[in-house]
Image (tube, helix red, strand yellow):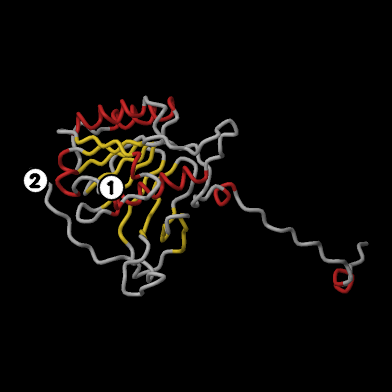
Amino acid sequence: MTVPTPLSAFARRPALPQRRRLPSAVEAARWRPGLADAALHGEVFAPAGEASGAALALALALDRLRSAAPDPAADVPDERPWLWVQDAQALRLGGRPYRPGLPRALRHRLIHVAAASPEEALFALEEGLRCRDLAFVIGEMAGDPRALDFTATRRLSLMAERHGVPLWLVRLAARPGLSSARLRWQARAAPSLPGPWNPQAPGHPAWLAELFRARAHPPGEWILRDDGHVLAAGPAHPGDLVPPAGDRPLAAG
């Protein structure tokens, strides 16, 4: 005959220690500024009526340079040039890079290529990615040109990985179709914080940035701000978006 155990016996047993929950692999791999990442090919989708795409690409490139481990054999700072390629439509929509408005550390190192067509822009990007003496490459293309298909993005990814040159491809007023890019962003301008000396003056640039596809990170959305020294990320909230300026038409002009 089995004697039932009184409930008080369970109450006297010591409680098992609660284990601290360890972050999952997905949580541990969540993207953040300054995170060392093997991805060398990223895309930034942005409206054509504002310069948020190119600005975010520059901020991400600088963030990668700042977070890179210094070369112990180098006795001088990294002064490698960088390449900016624009096709004709992107050049018409956003204009040429304005050197005095670029980050101070990059102004004198810019190599700019104005390509007449998407095909020429892709050729210039591939040639730039073959040059290991470049710090990084930024491409800016408008719309959805036929030449920029999955095969073309795959070639860009392979070139970037083979030669170790990071690439950020800015897509103006484009649809995020198939692509081999390792990190894919949607970006819009966000309100900047008041200036430190004059609250009426423009503050540091800010973006509402959504990482909607990545090989090693889960999707996420942040407000990114760059003060010229560090790229900081904060949570995104409703109302963080600047009213759109309106995309300009992509017809040739």
Q: In the rendered structure, which amino acid carries the disc numbered 1? A: Arg
Q: Quadrant of residue 121?
A: top left
Q: Residues within 10 Å of mark 1 (few under 14, many from 20)?
A: few
Q: In the rendered structure, which amino acid carries the disc numbered 2? A: Ala
Residue 47 coordinates in the image, percent (x, y):
23, 53
Above or below: residue 252 compared with residue 128: below
**Residue located at (56% from left, 38% from top):** 70
Residue 99 numbered mark, or none: 1
* Residue nearest the observer in this picture, 56 or 45: 56
Q: CA distance from mark 1 to mark 2?
A: 27 Å
* Residue nearest the observer in this picture, 165 or 112: 112
Residue 253 coordinates in the image, percent (x, y):
6, 45
Secondary structure state at the residue bearing disc 2: loop
Above or below: residue 156 compared with residue 243: above
Q: Quadrant of the N terminus?
A: bottom right
Residue 166 numbered mark, or none: none
Name the residue tied to disc 2: 251
Seen from this angle, which residue lies furthest left? 253
